[in-house]
Image: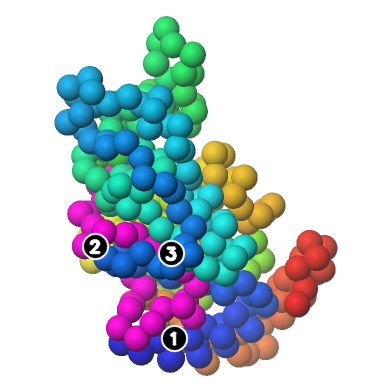
Amino acid sequence: MTMNPILHGTAAFMEHLGLNEEPFGVHYSDIKPENASGPKVGPPISRELEDRGELDIQEVLKGFTCVMGSVWLARKRRGAAFISAEEYGCPGGVYYCSLIKPHLRFLEYYVSNGFEGTPMQGERYMPNPDAMREMLHKVDPREAPAKYCVFKPLSQFTEGEEPEFIIFFVRPEILTGLFTQAVFTTGDVDCVVSPFGAGCTNMISWPLYYKEKGLEKAVIGGFDPSARKFMRVDELTFTVPLSLYKKMLDALPESMFNHDTDWKNVRKKVARSARAWGEEE
């Protein structure tokens, strides 16, 4: 597949949106990109080791690297980020990026109310381990088709590479444009969703969940308190499957961006926001 039509359409879309940062694509590859941001090799992890009491979670967490942190570095460097089953950094991220199955039971407690009688009080994002377990069973990422899950700018996809999903990092004004274009393209009032998840869950796991069900859904994310430090102030993520993204680009000529609509007023606020944050180019 050639990326040229997508890159050309993306450039036009970015101009309509007032977006200065190129969106990322995510795909799976057996080749790790050169100079990519990502974690170091960690101790082996698996449910089997955990159930046998042979998993030292404290040793695992010594090399903690958040997927969102790797992507944040990649964004700043305009390069790639990666995660693999050996170079994982985060026991949650490696599951959410579909690189190990099943999930570690540790996550059920870590994201909820912790381990009674220990200093680990939990993140308190879920009320109890049962609720978290249900979420993990539901999202259930497929087995990865290649060794590495790779995030990189769209323009860095080479001939023969194809992103499964397109990820935008945006503030609410631009998000308004993305949301509306998805609805305009599909006519589906439920085509944009935002289920609970970690930062990476809403960039890859939930998008995969809907894709595996044959549903074209865009997913909004960025509500994970632990991942906010790896995002700009007021920023959220908007992830869309490639199939829907192509349709969104094809629908641009008849959209609000090319007619006399209230988008022109939102576009002024986009410019004001860029000035306020010193992000004008």
Q: Position of residue 221 (x, y in %)?
A: 49, 53
Task: Give the residue type that dot 3 points to.
Answer: Phe
In the displayed structure, does residue 112 sit left or right of residue 216?
right
Q: Nearer the viewer, mark 1 or mark 2?
A: 2
Mark 2 is on which residue type? Ala
Q: Is residue 154 left or right of residue 108?
A: right
Looking at the rendering, the stretch of residues picked out in magenta corresponds to 138-164
Q: What residue sits 62% from the left and 72% below the top? A: 21
Q: In the picture shown, does residue 263 fall above or below 260?
A: above
The mark lying in front, picked from 1 and 3, is 3
- From the viewer's perspective, tell me whether residue 103 is left or right of residue 241: left
Q: 265 above or below 116?
A: below
Q: Alpha carbon of mark 1 to alpha carbon of mark 3: how far?
A: 17 Å
Q: Kindly identify the residue that appears in the image at 44 percent across and 68 percent down.
A: 34
Return the x and y of residue 54 as percentages of the image width and height. 23, 23
Q: Which mark is residue 146?
A: 2
Sooner in the amino-acid sequence: mark 1 or mark 3: 1
Residue 160 is a magenta residue: yes
Please tell me which residue lies in front, 73 or 232: 73
Label 2 element class: loop
Q: How many marks?
A: 3
What element does badge 3 sit on?
A: strand
Q: Residue at x 36, y 40 (%)?
A: 42
132 w.r.t. 259: above or below: above
Q: Are marks 3 and 2 in contact (CB under 8 Å)?
A: no
Name the residue carrying label 1.
Answer: 6
| Mark 1 or mark 2: whose residue is earlier in sequence | 1
